[in-house]
Image (cartoon, grey):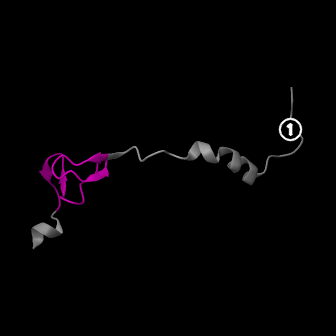
Amino acid sequence: MAVPKRKTSHSRKMKRRSSVWKLAEPTNLVKCPSCGEYNLAFRVCKACGQYKGEQVIATKAENK
């Protein structure tokens, strides 16, 4: 069985793996059903303050 003669350096290892770690697009962004803004899945919408159709937090537009 072949065994490497020297330890693979951290930089050489990470250069080899660099293309594997890149993501084409963020996979967990979803559209808010009420306002249509993109936000993280299973989080309160920052634009309208709703989560699962219920008003959870007050937004700046509602306070004025």
- Local packing at callout 1 (Cα closer than 10 Å; few below 14, some 14-19, many 20+) is few
Residue ID at (18%, 58%): 49
Q: Main secondary structure of the magenta part?
A: loop
How far across and how far down the image is residue 22, in percent? 54, 47
Instruction: Name the one closer to the observer, 2 or 27.
Output: 27
- First to last magenta residue range: 30-57
Identify the residue under disc 1: 4
Query: Is 38 a magenta residue?
Result: yes
Quarter of the image where the N terminus is located: top right
Picture layout, residue 15 above or below residue 59: above
Residue ID at (9%, 73%): 64
Residue ID at (11%, 71%): 63
**38 relative to 63 in the view: left or right:** right
Secondary structure, mark 1, is loop
Amino acid type of the residue tagged 1 in the rendering: Pro
**44 relative to 15 in the view: left or right:** left
Instruction: Name the one closer to the observer, 57 or 13.
Output: 13
How far across and how far down the image is residue 37, in percent? 24, 53
